[in-house]
Image (cartoon, helix red, strand yellow):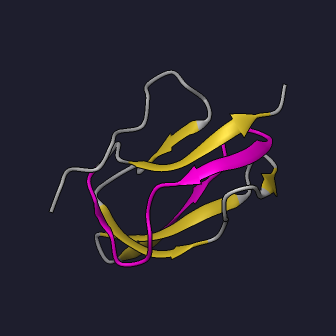
């Protein structure tokens, strides 16, 4: 399995996994308009479900994961075009 791209540090719209885990469900699709705090991806990490939420308002540019993907901390999950 190839290594996944990492989220870019300091780039608000580059959203990474907070910890290693498995993607259970993606909650957004490319082109979706989202608001800060909206759920992006549901993960299972250390037997607990974790929701990765949007850090900003914007439009989904890319969903980098699918259900069943195994992630490491910092792996890119969603890229957002931030609304200024």
Q: Specify the quadrant of the image occupied by residue 41.
A: bottom right
Residue at 41% in and 51% down: 17
Q: Is residue 32 magenta?
A: no
Quadrant that contains the C terminus: top right
Q: Is residue 2 left or right of residue 33?
A: left
Residue at 69% in and 50% down: 60
- Residue stretch rendered in magenta on the structure: 50-72
Q: x, y percentage for residue 82? A: 74, 33
Closer-to-camera residue (36/31): 31
Q: Is residue 52 magenta?
A: yes
Residue at 44% in and 71% down: 66
Quadrant that contains the N terminus: bottom left
Depicted 20 relative to depicted 47: above or below: above
Q: x, y percentage for residue 33? A: 82, 53
Depicted 50 relative to depicted 68: above or below: above
Q: Is residue 81 left or right of residue 77?
A: right
Q: Is residue 64 left or right of residue 61?
A: left
Q: x, y percentage for residue 71? A: 29, 59
Residue at 33% in and 43% down: 5
């Amino acid at each position: 399995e190839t290594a996944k791209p990492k989220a870019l540090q300091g780039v608000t719209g580059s959203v990474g996994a907070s910890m290693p885990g498995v993607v259970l469900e993606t909650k957004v699709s490319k082109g979706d308009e989202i608001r800060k705090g909206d759920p992006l991806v549901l993960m299972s990490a250390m037997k607990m479900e974790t929701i990765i939420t949007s850090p900003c308002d914007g439009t989904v540019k890319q969903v980098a994961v699918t259900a069943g993907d195994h992630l490491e901390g910092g792996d890119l999950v969603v890229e957002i075009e931030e609304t200024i």
